[in-house]
Amino acid sequence: MPKLKLLPLLAFSLCLAISLIRAADEPASDTSESLLKRLNWIKGPARADLKSLAEIQVPEGFVFTGAKETRQLLEAMGNPTSGSELGFLAPTSLAWFVVFEFSDVGYVKDDDKDKLNAEKLLKSIKAGTEQANQFREKMGAAPLHITGWEIPPHYNEQTHNLEWAIRAESEGHPVINYNTRLLGRKGVMEVNLVIDPEKLNTAMPAYQTVLKDYSYKAGERYAEYHQGDKLAKYGLAALITGGAAAVAVKTGLFASLIVLFKKGWKLVVLAVAAVVAWFKRLITGGRKTRETPQ
């Protein structure tokens, strides 16, 4: 199951900032701001498609871009892509962002919904993360250590949404890995929230609104399962432990970016401010955007 290498918001902003810092010596087409301008943005309020699978409502003050553009953004940040990325959503403040990625593993049965033992799951995740630290060491990244649940696993039988959030630390810095899995007929929409841990509580109302306004299209909904459809080879518990293991291996960029941020934070803050200002200009009408019809 392909996984996005999750980057904290700091990493996202920093990568864009570093590009902007270097912009003076590079052609304009190579700068992060130039990349942002070239992408097709939908500004809220509007409806946006996640290809033919689902749709979301883009709130006012937010921007969205589709599958191809999402991969371009992630690759510009030095983040390998899997081809399963479908969308990127963020407020213009860049306080947080969401990446939508679809895993076509088949219909995931929720038979184990009443057997999600948070204590056992956390123990498994901790063990897997410590093993993954061996790979992080080879990558030159600092170890990542799980400290507990921020939000224990919870499954909503009505919406077929699975959510959990894990607290961790790397080199003394707090990390939150917040995950939502939206079950569909043919697979799972993986919604990865990337945020500074200190801003999580503030962002949750807006994030929950985004999830509430998400919907699978006709024929793709969980309730529309037909006998003979492809079945996933695992259940809800494996979505949690498998997702956490992948994140533990793939967040190696976090620690190195934290160190770089410490060394040049004043310059970086100025450059990040330029990126945020560009997003705000996008919202206030500085550039026309492509909007999907209501």
Image (cartoon, rainbow, N blue to C red):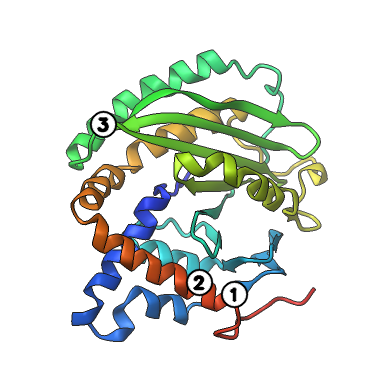
Q: Which residue is mark 2?
A: 279
Q: Choose top left, top right, bottom left or bottom right for residue 60.
A: bottom right
Which residue is at a point 44% across and 64% down the rendered structure image? 71
Circle 3 residue: 143
Residue 261 percent across, percent down from the top left? 25, 52
Q: Which residue is at 71% across, 76% downward?
A: 292
Q: Is residue 135 left or right of residue 50?
A: left
Residue at image x 81%, y 57%?
218
Please give the label number shown on residue 225: none
Q: Is residue 64 left or right of residue 38?
A: right
Q: Where is residue 286 shown, x and y percent of the image?
A: 55, 84
Find residue 283 and name its label: 1
Q: Mark 1 to mark 3: distance in Å?
A: 39 Å
State yes or no: discs 1 and 2 in contact (Cβ < 8 Å).
yes
**Nearest to N terminus: mark 1 or mark 3:** 3
Amino acid type at mark 1: Ile
Residue 28 vs residue 134, the one in the foreground: 28
Which kind of residue does numbered mark 3 sit on? Pro
